[in-house]
Amino acid sequence: MWYNNVIQIFKIRELRNKILFVLGIFAMVRVMANIPIPGINIENLKEIFEQFQVLGLLNIFTGGALERMSIIMLGLGPYITATIILQLLTMIFPQLEEMYKEEGEAGKRKFEQYGRILTLPLAFLQAFAMLSLFTRQGVIGELGFLAKISAIITVTAGSFLLMWLGELISEKGIGNGVSLLIFAGIIAGFPRNVGQLIFTFEASMILSYLIFFLMSLLIIAGVTVVNEARRNIPVSYAKRVRGRMVYGGASTYLPLSVNPAGVIPIIFALSILTFPSMIANFLTGSEGFLGGVAQTILNIFNNTWIYGGLYFLLIFLFTYFYTLITFEPDSIAENLKKMGGFVPGIRPGKSTAHFLNFILNRILPFGALFLASIALMPSIVQSITNITVFSFLIGGTSLIIIVSVVLETIRQIQSQLEMREYESF
C-alpha cells in the first residue's frame, strides 16, 4: 500500500535526507518570495495586474513573487529562455549540436555552462524592463540612477540564486530542480485560491461549481493517462553461447512515450510568449517607430484568439522540436545492435532507426495535440462556468506541470526504493 512506501521512504536515511533537503529549499524560496523591493504602491500594483493578463500568468509561475515585487520576481524565466535560445541555436550551428549530442556528459556540462552565462544578460534585461514598466505605471516611486542599478542587480541576483537552487535540487535532492521549483510556486497559491472560492461561494452558482469540479477531475484523469501512456516496441535478444553458458534469448520491450517532451514545451511556449510582450510593455511609452511597434505587439498579445492560437501552435511545434533534440533513434538502434538486440521483423541498424522514427511520428502528433489542447482549457472552463478562481490551476499549463512533476518524482522515489530492495536482497 502507498502508506507503506511513505513509511519506507522515511526509514531510509539517504532518501529521507534528500526529501528534507528539497523541502528546506522550498521553504527558503517561499521566504525570498516575500521579501519585497522598497517603495511599492500596492493599489497601483493591483491595477496593473488587472490591466496586463500576461503578468498574472507570470505571477503563477513565480509563486506570487511578482505580485509582491520580491527579490525573485523574475523566477526562473531568464534561465529557461536562455536554455531555449541555446537549443534553437543547435539547429543553426552544427558545433553546438555536436557538443550537446556527441561529446557525452562533458559536452552537456559545457552546454549548461553556456546557458548560465546567457542567463546573466537576459536576467539583467528583463529586470530593467520590468522595473521600468512598474515605475512608469506608478507602482514604484522614481528611483535615482544608483537605486535603480541596485534594484536591477538585486533582482538579477535573485534569478541567479533560484537557478543555483534548482541545480542543487537536481544534484543533491530528488527530481528535476527547475520543474520542482516551478511546481512549488504554483502550489503556493493553492490555499489562497481555496479560501477565495469558499468566501465567494453563492448558492445560485451551485451547478456551475459542480460542472467546474467535474471538468477538473476529467482534465486531471486525461493528463495522467496521456502522461503515462506508452507505445511498447518488442525487442528480442539473440542467444549467445560462451563455453557452457548461454546468454540472451530474452524478450523485452522498448517503451516510447506518447508525450516524450513532458511539460517542457509548455514552459518553452510561455517563455517565448511572455518575453516579447514584456519588452513591448517597456517600450509602449516611447515615441516614434519603436512606440508604434510596441503598441502593435501589445494589441496582438491582448487579443484572446490570437494569443490562444499562438500558444497552441508554439506548444505543438516545441513538442516536436524538443523530442527531436532529446530522442535519438540512431543511437538507440546502434546500442541495441551492440547488445545483440533487434525488433522482430526489422533489420538491426539503420532499418531499426527508421522504424523507431516511423512509430514516433505516428504517436507524437496525438501527444502534441493533447498537450496544446489542455493548455487552452482554462479559457474553455471559464467561459462555461463563469468561475475565474483556479482558471489557471485546472488548465493545462499549471495542471500539466503539477501532474507531470508529481508523477516523475514518484517514479524516481519508487526506483530508489526498488534499488535498495535489490541491494538488500
Image: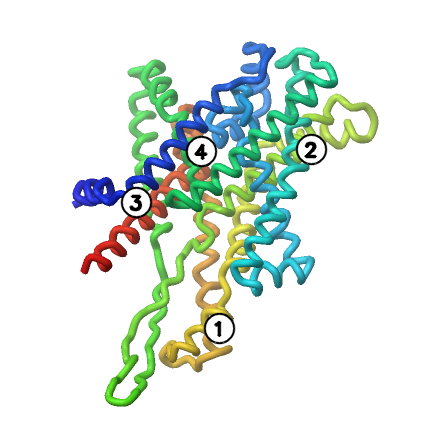
Mark 4 residue type: Pro
Q: Are marks 4 and 2 in contact (CB under 8 Å)?
A: no
Q: CA distance from mark 1 to mark 4?
A: 39 Å
Q: CA distance from mark 3 to mark 4?
A: 40 Å
Residue placed most toward the observer, 92 or 317: 92
Tag 2–tag 3 contact (CB < 8 Å)? no
Q: Earlier in the sequence, mark 4 or mark 2?
A: 2
- Mark drawn on residue 134: none
**Residue 14's mark?**
3
Q: Which residue matches tag 1? A: 353
Q: Secondary structure at mark 4?
A: helix
- Which residue is at 70% across, 23% downward? 149
Q: Dot 4 corresponds to which residue?
A: 378
Q: Is residue 160 left or right of residue 124?
A: left
Reply above or below: 45 against 85: above
Q: Residues within 10 Å of mark 3 (few under 14, many from 20)?
A: few
- The amino acid type of the residue labelled 1 equals Ala
Residue at x 30%, y 44% (from the top left corner):
15
Q: Amino acid at mark 3?
A: Glu
**Label of residue 297 in the image:** 2
